[in-house]
Amino acid sequence: MNTDLDELKVTLDHVNRARLGIAAGEDSAERDIERAYRASMTLAIYGTLAPGKVNHHHIADLGGTWRDAAVRGSLGRVPCGIHEGLPAIVLGPAQPLHPLKLLASEALPAAWDHLDAFEGEEMQRLLVPLEGEGGVANIYALRRKMIELLG
């Protein structure tokens, strides 16, 4: 693994710990990621928000472009709450590649509050490296499992 990718993963780990509330905030690290990757304008989707799925209407009006992508993670299910039983990813560098759809839209930053509320407290929006692309995207991951892994 190259040094740049190692450094990116360390930075993402710090940012995600802050987003999960298990470490101090990393505002400068998050700004650096935004400058380099424009991550606020990307959402990696593996479940019901994808085109043709039941909850796609929550993002259908955002416009943007879609493409195939992949992240490292394992798919499980939301254990409780309003989305009980729906797909939920647990991220991890040793996990297999998981294919997904990537939405890139300049309208996403204004939609994050709505999407965060829709996803509920069982899910957490984290940053994840896109495999084979060198990019970074937001993704909703299973909050409790990610706290266990990163905590």
Image (tube, helix red, strand yellow):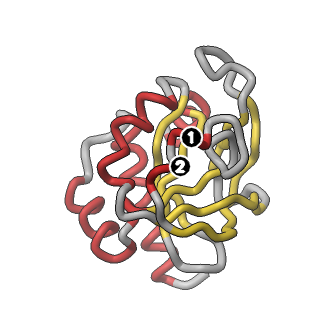
Q: Which residue is mark 1?
A: 57
Label 2 Cα crowd, 10 Å radius (few <14 / some 14-19 / many 20+): few
Q: Residues within 10 Å of mark 1 (few under 14, many from 20)?
A: some
- The dot on residue 60 is 2
Image coordinates for residue 93, horizontal then vertical, percent: 65, 60
Please state which of residues 130 and 68 is positioned toward the viewer in this rendering: 68
Percent position of residue 139, x then y: 53, 50
Mark 2 secondary-structure assignment: helix
Q: Are marks 2 and 1 in contact (CB under 8 Å)?
A: yes
Q: Residue at x 43, y 59 (%)?
A: 12
- Indicate the amino acid at tag 1: His
Q: Amino acid at mark 2?
A: Ala
Q: Is residue 81 above or below residue 106?
A: above
Point out the residue furthest to the front here. Answer: 61
- Res 146 → quadrant: top right
Determine if residue 149 is in view.
Answer: no
Asked if residue 23 can be seen in this view, the reply is yes
Label tally: 2
- Is 76 placed left or right of 44 in the picture? right
* Marks 2 and 1, how far apart at CA: 5 Å
Residue closest to the far left = 28
Query: Measured along the vertical axis of the image, is residue 97 above or below residue 149?
Result: below
From what the image shows, is residue 127 above or below residue 9? Answer: above
Q: Secondary structure at mark 1?
A: helix
Quarter containing the N terminus:
bottom right
Left or right, residue 77 beside residue 14: right
